[in-house]
Structure formats: structure tokens, C-alpha cells
Image (spheres, helix red, strand yellow):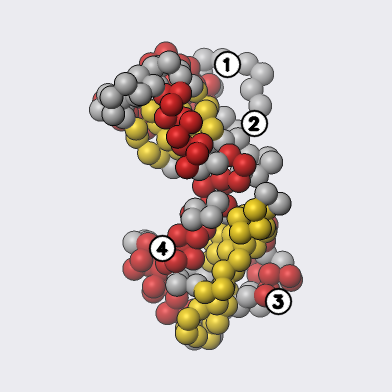
Amino acid sequence: VVNMDLSTVGDQLETFIPPKYAESWDNVGWMVGPLSESFHGVLITVDVTRAAIEAALDRDLNLVLSHHPLIFDSLDSLVEGRPVDDLIMKAVRERVGVFTAHTNADSMPGGLNDLFSDVLELEDIEPISPLEVDPQAGLGRMGKLPDSATIGAIEEALVESLDLNHVQSTGDPDQPIESVAVCTGSGADFISRDLANRVDLFVTGDVGHHDVLEAQALDL
């Protein structure tokens, strides 16, 4: 890329992954923005870590594009020795931009939840929690399988398609499934009677012990 600064790259990212699709509690966009710097290249990562920033520097890349925000809670100060503060100050010192696309990348049409739905070939897809700005966008997706499948068969398909090392599920592996909800990341907040009445199976990332017990009690 010739004669493009980080400000222009940020504008293009916000066009491609609009911030309007982010949840109100989320923090997306520039975390560290040396906008006048010429763009050298980008490192894409789930989390902003010291290793990620150093890997970018080793490759002369001056933009880190992350899924999880480097700055999530409000900052009252920057103090050396605190892990997040150290990462922010390192990025500032090295003139490395940090840009985040989090729930907007999950929720947008064509985003991560739609890609996740495609893995299972879901049909008649709709968001679990539609956004006011666009009823086709929102966290999570629900849909029907093209053909009934068992929980065990769906697990095998996910392991193969997503190259997973570990999958854990509740319910009988031979239980037939016709409808599925998916949510990238942590979807535990969606575990409810309402969801159990609408789908047979819920596939998500991070859930706690008591969330699993609740899903079992709901036969989800």
C-alpha cells in the first residue's frame, strides 16, 4: 500500500465493519491511534498482548487489528507496571496503531455470526437479539438445519470445520436436532426458557458451570 496513513485505514475499516453494529457497552475502533503514521502493514489477533505487538514490530507492521478491545473499562490513569497500561504505553512509544472490531464484527450482516451459521449450513436465519439499526443484524443467529442431525454428528462437523481440539456438550449425543442457535464468543446470557422454546441446540464459546446447569434444566 502506497501513500496511505493510518487515519485512512481506520476510515476504511469502519466502512467495512461499521461501529453502529457494536453493543452500547462495547468499545470498538481506535484504542491507540497514531493517525498520521504511514501504513506499513497489519497484524490480526484475537487479543492485544505483548507478544502480538512485538510480532508486529518484528515484521515492521504498525497496525494491530484485534477482536477483543485493549481498552474496555474507562481509564483514569496510565501507570507503568500495570499489564494493560504497559501495553498501551508500548504501542504509543512504538507508534503502533491498535484498532478493534468486536461486537460489530460479530453482529453485522456477513459478520462472524453469519459465518458461524454458514458452517452449520443453517437456513431461515435471524438474529437472536436484533439491533434497532438493522433487524438483520445483532448478536447470535438462529436457524434450521437443512436435514435433521444428532448432537454427536453436529459436534463432529464442528470439530472438523473449525479445527477444534475440544468440544463439550450437554444432552444425549443421539438426540435429533432440527433447529440451532449460535453465538460467537460468550453467549451465556442468551440461555433462557425463551431460547429453549425456539431452538433445540445452542452453540457458543464461553459458558460457566452454572450456565451449563441452567441449559440442562431447560433441556437446551
Query: Are the residues flagged by discs 3 and 1 in contact, CB closer than 8 Å?
Result: no
Q: CA distance from mark 1 to mark 2?
A: 13 Å
Q: In the image as oriented, which residue stretches furthest toward the right?
A: 193
Label 4, label 3: how far apart the Cα atoms are: 27 Å
Q: Amino acid at mark 1?
A: Leu
Q: Is residue 208 above or below residue 42?
A: below
Residue 148 in view here: yes
Give residue 206's position: percent from left, percent from top.
Answer: 55, 55
The circle drawn on residue 197 is 3
Q: Earlier in the sequence, mark 1 or mark 4?
A: 1
Residue where numbered disc 1 is placed:
78
Packing grade of label 2 (10 A; few <14, some 14-19, many >=20) is: few
Give the class, few, some or many, for how many residues have Cα within 10 Å of label 3's Cα (few <14, many ≥20): few
Task: For the N terminus, give its image quadrant.
Answer: top left
User: Element at badge 4?
Assistant: loop
Closer to the camera in the image, 8 or 67: 8
Residue 166's disc number: 4
Q: Position of residue 104 (x, y in %)?
A: 56, 45
Mark 2 or mark 4, earlier in chain: 2
Q: Nearer the viewer, mark 2 or mark 3?
A: 3
- Locate residue 187, reporting x and y percent: 60, 57
Q: Residue at x 71, y 76 (%)?
A: 197
Nearest to the eye among marks 2 and 4: give it: 2
For the C terminus, give its image quadrant.
bottom right
Tag 2: residue type? Asp
Q: Are marks 2 and 4 in contact (CB under 8 Å)?
A: no
Which amino acid, mark 3? Asn
Who comes first in sequence, dot 2 or dot 3?
Answer: 2
| Mark closest to the chain's N terminus, 1 or 2 | 2
Q: Secondary structure at mark 1?
A: loop
Secondary structure of residue under mark 3: helix
